[in-house]
Image (tube, helix red, strand yellow):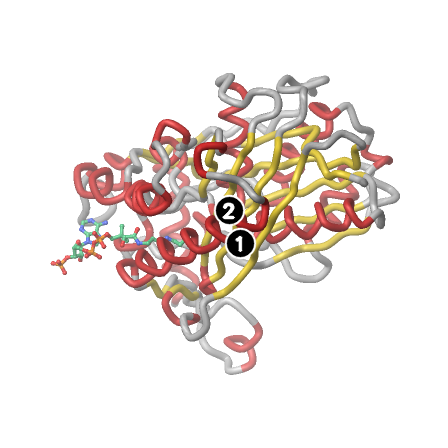
Amino acid sequence: MIHAEITGWGRCLPPAVLSNRDIETIMDTSDEWIFSRSGIRERRISHVTGAELGVVAGTRALAAAGVAAADVDMIVYATSSPDELIPNTASIVQNRLGALHAGVLDINAACSGFLYAFNMVSDMIRAGSIRTALVIGSERLSSLMNWSRRESAVLFGDGAGAFVLQASAHASGFFAGKLGCVPGTRELLAIPDFGLDAIAQYRPLDISIDFSGPEIFKHAVKGMGDACEAVLTQGGVQLHELDLIVPHQANLRIVEAVVRRLGVSTDKVVLTLEKYANTSTSSIPIALCEALDDGRVKPGMTILFTAFGAGLTWAASLLRWGQRVTPLGTTDIELPPCEQTGLELTQAAIARRARQRT
Ligand SMILES: CC(C)(COP(=O)(O)OP(=O)(O)OC[C@H]1O[C@@H](n2cnc3c(N)ncnc32)[C@H](O)[C@@H]1OP(=O)(O)O)[C@@H](O)C(=O)NCCC(=O)NCCS
């Protein structure tokens, strides 16, 4: 039997930090409100495109796996904030990395997109149709924010994370997955003016997230809870056998509610919300990279991923970690330097948006 193992991992967090205190200077909110309602203290604001973040994360993941770009069969790029639609962003990554033999695909399942990609690519490897894949989640959500909408603007951040998945004869890697979408909930989380429909109707560019926070909250707890229970049953894993849970990082209270519902100790949960906020598709690979750096991932561990997002999509994956918990190699790739602070980048985005509206 062929197994699909994570052999490389990488992340790219843009350097500019936007703290809750910074946000207090541009809208009617407070560090106390944001932190107590969400667990977030700060987030990163990107000075480069989402593709650029993805290229850096992907290059780091390939170095960690010791895999040459030319040996990648498939690049899947999950995002909720695409730089462009045609051609897709995975083809930018292919060109930049020199992954000459790779198929390229973008996936949009909002914040669940990385797990949709991870589960599908793992199954392609297990079926024998490909041997090596690069899965990237990358977001520049700050460029989609409407900074006059305090209920959503404070929750998101920019960043990218990537895994290299490889065919393996060892009994490790992905072994159970579940994907879904709650019918009738599309309007709870949407960006209505971000697509051809708005352009065809000549509506002015006024990108803004429609957002029903408390409703999404309830669906998120149920969706992720159901998904986790489904993969545990499918994988024949008892709760006490779970070693690590890496959830999508949308809100600390959502994560705590899911963990409470499952009946698992919060010590097993990886959290990065405080530093990076909700980075959508990249939150799970970023969190796993941090857990590896912190020595929290051990050989043979059973790990649960779970996510939810606009749609409202939901997903879960179960995997058994392999033997290696350190990278095989490193790379000196870095983002271009950033001269501005997170607040300056945000103020510039607000001014740009005001000009576009007139
Ligand atoms: C958004 C969220 C943090 C709000 O938390 P909450 O406890 O449900 O808070 P509520 O929506 O009930 O709002 C409470 C009050 O705070 C106010 N408020 C909202 N955003 C605020 C902000 N940034 N600062 C200060 N006050 C704010 C609201 O106006 C409301 O005031 P009111 O009671 O006078 O009307 C929470 O619901 C959430 O995280 N939801 C899901 C997140 C999500 O969808 N993420 C993306 C999908 S992956």
Q: Amino acid at mark 2?
A: Arg
Total tally of numbered discs in the picture: 2
Q: Which quadrant holds residue 336?
A: top right
The spot of residue 351 in percent (x, y) is: 37, 52
What residue sits 37% from the left and 31% below the top? 275
Residue 84: give x, y in percent of width and height.
63, 57
Q: Which mark is residue 81?
A: 1
**SS for dot 2:** loop
Taking the image as four quarters, which one is ligand 1 found in?
bottom left
In percent of width and height, residue 189 lies at 39, 64
- Kindly identify which residue carries mark 2: 140
Please state which of residues 90 and 181 is positioned toward the viewer in this rendering. 181
Q: Secondary structure at mark 1?
A: loop
Residue 342 against residue 181 in the figure, above or below: above
Looking at the image, which is closer to me, 176 or 12?
A: 176
CA distance for labels 2 and 1: 6 Å
Instruction: Specify whether residue 347 is in view.
Output: no
Q: Name the residue type under label 1.
A: Ser
Q: Is 202 placed above or below 236 here?
A: below
Whether residue 98 is visible to the viewer of this picture, yes or no, is: yes
For the point 39% across and 66% down, which residue is it?
A: 357
Label located before the other in sequence (2 or 1): 1
